Image: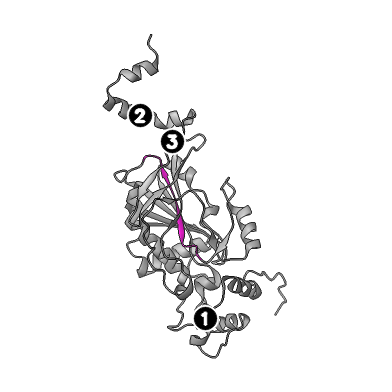
Amino acid sequence: MRSWSLLLRLLPAALLALLGSWWGPALAAEGQPPAPPEVVTTGGRLRGKQVNIPGAKRRVDVFLGVPFAKPPVGPLRFSPPQPAEPWTQLRDATSYPPMCLQDPVLAQLLSDDFSNNKEKVSLRNSEDCLYLNIYTPANSDNKANLSVMVWIHGGGLLLGAASTYDGSALAAYENVVVVTIQYRLGILGFYSTGDEHSRGNWGFLDQVAALQWIQENIAFFGGDPGSVTLFGESAGGCSVSAHVLSPVSKGLFHKAISQSGVAILHAALETHPERLAKKIAEVAGCPASSSFEMVSCLKGKTENEILETTLKMEFTRLSLDRNEK
């Protein structure tokens, strides 16, 4: 009886190619690493990696640190997100992006408690953080039309990162495209003077920008832009609820799952943002006589100075003394 290898050599090239697409994942699992997946987006070409999920029938193509907006630094601080700059060379998408600026100690605690990611993820802080991660069943092309699930992380709008959550198992077992997104947090994400100088909710606008990018590009990863489910937990659930209510997000998603959070929570609303804005400016060492002066001064602060101000404000401190005034 002829061996399979001899038989395969005798098969017509066209049939061999067809069988190769069927047996590809099995061959890769036997020690032959698959070629890194590549996708052309509106911004340029990306190279990701392919991973095997134990017990799943399909492998997953993973693209990490994909930019969906320009770095919100310098003059773009306290401003709506701008479209990402295109790139001409093949862009590596195999490394996790830095998380948005936040308390590093609490960020580590949150990651340790909530992460399902078995890889060691760097918890680097950076103001340059508007990136998303994509997990899609291997070999999905623009005709696959798979449902898309977009995850918004929690953390009180102060903490969290997209890379804390690994979407590969969900993509493999449920045959869906999973996207995890990041957005500006804390002072950089929600500083508002209550007027035209800094209207605030920059973090929510970052989420809108990510959804817009997904609409324009997810088909290249096998996703259906007409079947996008937005889901999130805690502050992520509040975010989902906000997008359900906001006309700005209309048409960017089609289903929503809000876990442990809604936009009308009292804790999520600030009725006098100018008071908090003034306090933040004073703690940062900025003049607080006008909105223009506060915003201009804060825009000139370094990333570390903004982080120091965040820590001094003790946004995440919990009072356990009910009698404390």
Task: Looking at the image, tell me whether mark 2 or mark 1 is earlier in sequence order.
Answer: 2
Q: Nearer the viewer, mark 3 or mark 1?
A: 3
Q: Quadrant of residue 137?
A: top left
Task: Identify residue for label 3.
Answer: 34
In reply to whether residue 135 is colored magenta, the answer given is: yes
Amino acid type, callout 3: Pro
Query: Regarding mark 2 in the picture, which secondary structure is present there?
Result: helix
Quadrant placement of the N terminus: top left
Q: Quadrant of residue 84?
A: bottom left
Which span is picked out in magenta? 128-139
Q: Quadrant of residue 256?
A: bottom left
Residue type marked 1: Pro
Asked whether 198 falls inside the magenta stretch, the response is: no
The residue tagged 1 is: 273
Question: x, y (%) of residue 303?
Answer: 57, 71
| Residue identified by numbered label 2 | 20
Name which residue lies at 51% across and 76% down. Answer: 191
Quadrant of image for the C terminus: bottom right
Mark 3 neighbour class, 10 Å CA radius: few under 14, some 14 to 19, many 20 or more: some
Measure how far apart labels 3 and 1 are at the Cα level: 52 Å
Q: Nearer the viewer, mark 2 or mark 1?
A: 2
**For marks 3 and 2 on the same chain, the one whose residue lies earlier in the sequence:** 2
Instruction: Identify which amino acid the numbered label 2 is placed on.
Output: Gly
Q: Are marks 3 and 1 in contact (CB under 8 Å)?
A: no
Dot 1, how many residues are within 10 Å of its Cα: few (below 14), some (14-19), or many (20+)? some
Residue with the most extreme bottom position? 289
Residue at the front extreme, as displayed: 89
Task: Please name the residue shown 63% across and 75% down the image.
Answer: 313
Left or right of 195 in this view: 216: left
